[in-house]
């Protein structure tokens, strides 16, 4: 559906996007993840034709964004980071203009405006001035605008920034809903969000693609050992003694909790971390020591994200190049 | 393009922009009309237009400078870029919208000259209608003296006032012809406004020049100062005996080109041809004008000969 090849964008000496290549097939929700300044917005602007690339091509369903911009742009609905709204107009007037510009007319235009208003929950605000709407509603008007013309790809740049938790949940639900009928690409620097609604994640750092896979696969791919934390009401030595009898425990770290409680954090190299936790539970039960807490922490996207992005920062230029190759191959 | 045009027009007419612009333009033109038409009692609108052209230097940038900048400020330019319309069409749509905003007050202004055209200045031509009562004329047909004494009536233009004039005046009025109204002098310019005179006489060309101005002008032939009095008096006696349009057939006596201190008609070309023993045909700028006494032409030739020889 979308093919990006060797995309590079320079602002003077600063390289915002560095030789980025990926292909996004039709369907699903794609998350575009990266820290601030990673080049997410720049990439999205280039894909939608708002910016021109220094090098490289963007191809939307066979149409080059530079060669056949009108055909390509007809397939895309785009919500930039800051919703492009005319604050003096009502959502109805605004959507009317966008619809006309997208080539809709008469009955079809009315029908579509009505549909997107319903989809984004704006029916009751359609006659308010956009400038007077709350941020969440402005965001919805922006999304409604992107939905007009029934584009096959919907690109949303940080759609949940600055919204309250309830609105964030609503917008996420909306994105999930849209993913059933359109290809949705949205960018975020919030991991939990991406994890919650995306089928695939693209992680980008310093203008380079460093990972592109399903969230669960990314977790598996990461070689971070599984961690177990337990809390019990005995001294360290006793706990240490019991744990030494458990197989597959590689590293234990103790700390003192309140009321003479001992907190132990242990790592295991077992393929299934739950066999270790089961064994721990049985060992403590045998010793008639109650476990106050036993929790298993698996590696999550956050760890992957931090690891992947921080790793890049500490490595030298040469190694980075190599690593990037590996990741692309892995993806 | 149509979508952008519609949208821009809507925004101009939903906000104050179009109205303030229109009001400002109308106000300024109004001041011009006040000064150049109403107070000066002139119906010509062109003066106002030249006065108003100055204001466009200020008012057009005020109207147009925010067209793109405002989109950028509101970040809505990104929307325009991501929509399937080319930049050319966006600009064209915006331009046409501004044109409409500009044409609306202009449409009102275009009514002003229409109003003023009703108060056109009176032309400098007057029509006199002169006539006698046909019944009186019939009654007096037999008696010639009575006919001559019959009163006549005169009206100026479309005026409702009719003047009665005496029979004698009527006869005189009816005897007036075009030639009676014409200048009798071949050249009726002031001799003081001559700056140079080229004379062709007996196949030779002589150039007389002046220095100084008007009555104090000193005439030179080549380097020598000359007395022009004889030529001047000969010139003033070149008066028509009668007018003619006949092509000259006789021998050319003299031709003169006079340079005048006038912007509209800087040179006059005069030629004199023999007509018969008594008179010569005067040709001015290629067209036969009148018959002048031969003696006057000879006088002029003599006066010039005495100066140049």
Image (spheres, helix red, strand yellow):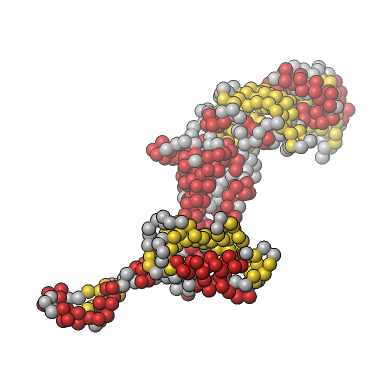
Looking at the image, residue A143 lies above or below residue A304: below
Q: Is residue A185 above or below residue B41?
A: above
The structure residue drawn at horizontal position 17% and vertical position 76%, both measured from the top left corner, is B133
| Relative vertical location of residue B200 with respect to residue A319 in this rendering, above or below | below
**In this view, which residue lies farthest toward the front?**
B277
Q: Is residue A326 visible?
A: yes
Q: Position of residue A302 (x, y in %)?
A: 73, 31
Residue B173 left/right relative to B234: left
Q: In which quarter of the image is residue B154?
A: bottom left
Q: Quadrant of the N terminus of chain A?
A: top right
Count of numbered tags = 0
Rendering coords of residue A207 (x, y %): 73, 31
The percent coordinates of residue B30 (x first, y second) are 48, 67
Q: Which residue lies furthest to the right in this view?
A: A237
**Residue at (74% x, 37% y) in the render:** A11
Q: Along the horizontal axis of the image, is B157 left or right of A151?
A: left
Q: In this view, does B90 lie to the left or right of B164?
A: right
- Quarter of the rendering occupied by the C terminus of chain A: top right
Q: Position of residue A323 (x, y in %)?
A: 79, 22
For the point 12% across and 75% down, the residue is B141
Camera sees residue B29: no
């Amino acid at each position: 559906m979308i093919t990006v090849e060797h995309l590079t964008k320079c602002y003077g000496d600063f390289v915002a996007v560095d030789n980025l290549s990926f292909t996004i097939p039709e369907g699903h929700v794609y998350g575009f993840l990266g820290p601030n300044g990673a080049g997410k917005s720049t990439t999205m602007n280039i894909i939608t034709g708002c910016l021109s690339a220094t090098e490289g091509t963007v191809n939307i369903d066979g149409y080059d964004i530079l060669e056949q911009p009108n055909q390509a742009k007809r397939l895309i609905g785009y919500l930039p980071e800051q919703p492009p709204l005319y604050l003096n107009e009502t959502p109805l007037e605004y959507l009317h203009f966008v619809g006309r510009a997208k080539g809709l007319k008469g009955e079809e235009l009315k029908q579509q405006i009505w549909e997107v208003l319903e989809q984004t929950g704006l029916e009751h605000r359609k006659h308010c001035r956009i400038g007077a709407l709350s941020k969440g509603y402005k965001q919805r008007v922006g999304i409604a605008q992107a939905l007009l013309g029934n584009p096959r790809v919907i690109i949303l740049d940080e759609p949940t920034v600055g919204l309250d938790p309830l609105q964030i949940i609503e917008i996420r639900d909306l994105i999930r809903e849209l993913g059933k009928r359109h290809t949705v690409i949205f960018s975020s620097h919030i991991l939990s969000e991406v994890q919650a609604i995306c089928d695939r994640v693209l992680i980008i750092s310093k203008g380079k693609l460093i990972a592109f896979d399903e969230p669960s696969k990314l977790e598996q791919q990461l070689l971070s050992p599984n961690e177990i934390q337990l809390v019990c009401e005995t001294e360290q030595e006793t706990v240490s003694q019991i744990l030494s009898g458990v197989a597959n425990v590689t590293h234990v770290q103790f700390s003192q909790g309140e009321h003479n409680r001992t907190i132990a954090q242990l790592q295991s190299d077992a393929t299934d971390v739950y066999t270790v936790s089961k064994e721990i539970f049985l060992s403590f039960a045998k010793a008639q020591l109650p476990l106050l807490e036993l929790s298993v922490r698996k590696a999550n996207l956050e760890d992957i994200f931090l690891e992947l992005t921080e790793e890049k920062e500490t490595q030298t230029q040469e190694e980075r190049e190599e690593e990037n190759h590996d990741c692309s191959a892995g993806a | 393009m149509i979508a952008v045009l519609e949208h821009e027009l809507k925004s101009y007419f939903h906000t104050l922009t179009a109205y303030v612009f229109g009001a400002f333009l109308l106000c300024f033109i109004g001041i011009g009309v006040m000064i150049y038409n109403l107070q000066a009692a002139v119906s010509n609108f062109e003066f106002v237009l030249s006065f108003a052209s100055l204001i466009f230097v200020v008012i057009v940038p005020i109207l147009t400078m925010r067209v793109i900048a405002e989109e950028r400020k509101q970040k809505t330019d990104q929307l325009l870029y991501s929509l399937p319309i080319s930049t050319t069409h966006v600009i064209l749509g915006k331009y046409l919208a501004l044109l409409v905003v500009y044409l609306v007050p202009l449409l009102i202004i275009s009514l002003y000259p229409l109003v003023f055209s009703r108060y056109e200045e009176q032309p400098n031509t007057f029509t006199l209608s002169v006539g006698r009562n046909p019944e009186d004329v019939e009654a007096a047909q037999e008696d010639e003296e009575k006919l001559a004494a019959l009163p006549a009536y005169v009206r100026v233009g479309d005026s409702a006032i009719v003047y009665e004039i005496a029979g004698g005046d009527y006869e005189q009025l009816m005897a007036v012809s075009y030639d009676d109204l014409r200048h009798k002098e071949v050249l009726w310019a002031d001799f003081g406004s001559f700056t140079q005179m080229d004379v062709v006489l007996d196949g030779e060309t002589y150039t007389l020049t002046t220095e100084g101005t008007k009555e104090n002008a000193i005439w030179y032939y080549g380097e020598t100062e000359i007395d022009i009095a004889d030529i001047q008096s000969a010139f003033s006696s070149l008066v028509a005996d009668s007018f003619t349009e006949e092509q000259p057939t006789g021998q050319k006596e003299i031709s003169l080109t006079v340079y005048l201190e006038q912007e509209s008609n800087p040179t006059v070309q005069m030629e004199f041809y023999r007509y018969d023993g008594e008179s010569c045909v005067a040709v001015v700028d290629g067209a036969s004008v009148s018959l002048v006494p031969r003696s006057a032409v000879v006088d002029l030739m003599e006066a010039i000969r005495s100066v140049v020889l």
